[in-house]
Amino acid sequence: MAKKSVATLQTGSKRLSKAIKMVKSPKTGAYTFVEAIMDPSKVNDFLSKK
């Protein structure tokens, strides 16, 4: 994992975060981006997973 990014989004009364991480493919070696919108308390778990 080479890069991490987190943006905070506010929609009405809900507070959400959009997390983006770069994942290296084991087959080709190319990097792909994985995005997810989630509760801010779950961002660290998402970024720590490989």
Image (tube, rainbow, N blue to C red):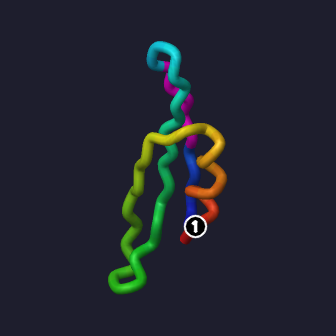
Quarter of the view holding residue 47: bottom right
| Segment tinted magenta in the rendering | 6-10
Q: Residue at x 55, y 39 (%)?
A: 39
Give the labeled residue for mark 1. 49
* 30 is higher (above) or lower (below) than 43: below
Q: Residue at x 53, y 35 (%)?
A: 17
Pick the front one: 3 or 42: 42
Quarter of the view holding residue 28: bottom left
Pick the front one: 21 or 43: 43
How far from the left and from the top, in percent, is residue 37? 44, 41
Q: Which SS does the magenta portion mostly show?
A: strand
- The 10 Å Cα crowd at callout 1, few under 14, some 14 to 19, many 20 or more, is few
Q: Is residue 43 left or right of residue 27?
A: right
- Which residue in the rendered view is the most extreme toward the left? 28
- Which residue in the rendered view is the most extreme toward the top? 12
8 in magenta: yes
Q: Is residue 5 left or right of residue 25?
A: right
Q: Residue at x 46, y 13 (%)?
A: 12
Quarter of the view holding residue 15: top right
Quarter containing the N terminus: bottom right
- Which residue in the rendered view is the most extreme toward the bottom? 27
* 46 is higher (above) or lower (below) than 11: below
How far from the left and from the top, in percent, is residue 30? 37, 72
Quarter containing the C terminus: bottom right
Q: Residue at x 51, y 45 (%)?
A: 19
How far from the left and from the top, in percent, is residue 10? 51, 20
* 36 is higher (above) or lower (below) than 39: below
Give the structural element (helix, strand or loop) at label 1. loop
Going by the numbered disc 1, the residue's amino acid type is: Lys
